[in-house]
Image (cartoon, helix red, strand yellow):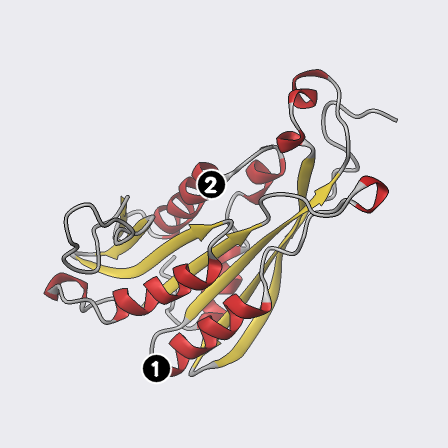
């Protein structure tokens, strides 16, 4: 089924992504999340959709200066149509990078029509019983997304927030590090068009009461 490039159409279709895989992935799920989005895009129209992982830069970079490549480019037919970024710590600068892709110097990227910025909770905050996983999206990142969206009103920016729940100490292999002590809570999606939030949807809720390695 072909996906329309309106924010609502894309968010509604993103409910079909395999979020249940993320629910059973612990630690940093960056690679899983990139792969999941690529799988979703290609599966939605396997005759016309394909992807470049570790996509090319938006322009020329000085030798030794990184940061120009994207996590993936979504392509339809012969052309790239979407830029994809998955980020756990640098939301503002990643939103700024999307702006650079929308204004890329390479002719091959002039066909970009949308962006997906997936934000995921990375590390807990607080101490003792007050330790928790912060929300995946923060106000500063959203403000930057709105600014970029206002400059490119015809190119929706889809923000996907993967929020996690801090569970505390685990047993077994998950007990080796606090890095593994959080589980997926829910996935929400928001679309920004013309500098404003146009649509918001809950894409997935984790109904599992507990993951492996629980300690009462």
Q: Residue at x 37, y 51 (%)?
A: 41
* In front of the other: 184 or 74: 184
* In front of the other: 58 or 82: 58
Q: Position of residue 193 (x, y in %)?
A: 44, 79
Task: Choose top left, top right, bottom left or bottom right for residue 94.
Answer: bottom left
Left or right relative to 4: residue 22? right
Q: Residue at x 67, y 23 (%)?
A: 174
Q: Position of residue 26 (x, y in %)?
A: 60, 32
Q: Residue at x 46, y 65 (%)?
A: 158
What SS does tag 2 mark?
helix
Left or right relative to 63: residue 42? right
Name the residue carrying label 1: 151
Q: Quadrant of the C terminus?
A: top right
Q: In the rendered view, tell whether residue 17 sits above or below residue 173.
A: below
Q: Residue 173, labelled with which disc?
A: none
Q: Position of residue 182 (x, y in %)?
A: 68, 37
Give the mark, 1 or 2, whose residue is nearer the N terminus.
2
Q: Residue furthest top?
A: 172
Left or right relative to 99: residue 212? right
- Are dots 1 and 2 in contact, CB under 8 Å? no
* In front of the other: 73 or 89: 89
Q: Quadrant of the N terminus?
A: bottom left
- At label 1, counting other C-alpha atoms closer than 10 Å, the crowd grade (few under 14, some 14-19, many 20 or more) is some
Q: In the rendered view, tell whether residue 181 sits above or below residue 184.
A: above
Q: In the rendered view, tell whether residue 33 sits above or below residue 105.
A: above
Q: How many marks?
A: 2
Task: Choose top left, top right, bottom left or bottom right for residue 61.
Answer: bottom left
Name the residue carrying label 2: 30
Marks 1 and 2, Cα distance to the nearest angstrom?
28 Å
């Amino acid at each position: 089924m072909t996906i329309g490039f309106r924010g609502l159409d894309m968010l509604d279709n993103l409910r079909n992504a395999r979020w249940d895989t993320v629910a059973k992935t612990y630690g940093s799920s960056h690679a899983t999340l990139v792969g999941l989005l690529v799988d979703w895009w290609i599966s939605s129209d396997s005759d016309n959709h394909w992807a470049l992982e570790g996509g090319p830069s938006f322009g020329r970079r000085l030798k030794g200066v990184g940061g120009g490549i994207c996590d993936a480019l979504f392509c339809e037919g012969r052309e790239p149509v979407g830029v994809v970024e998955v980020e756990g710590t640098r939301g503002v600068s990643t939103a700024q990078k999307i702006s650079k892709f929308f204004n890329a110097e390479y002719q091959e990227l002039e066909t970009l029509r949308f962006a997906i910025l997936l934000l995921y909770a990375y590390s807990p905050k607080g101490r003792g019983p007050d330790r928790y996983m912060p929300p995946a999206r923060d106000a500063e990142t959203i403000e930057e997304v709105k600014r970029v969206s206002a400059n490119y009103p015809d190119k929706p920016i889809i923000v996907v927030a993967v929020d996690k729940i801090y569970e505390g100490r685990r047993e077994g292999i998950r007990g080796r590090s606090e890095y593994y002590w959080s589980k997926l809570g829910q996935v929400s999606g928001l679309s920004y068009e013309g500098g404003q939030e146009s649509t918001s949807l809950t894409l997935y809720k984790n109904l599992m009461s507990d993951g492996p390695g629980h300690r009462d």
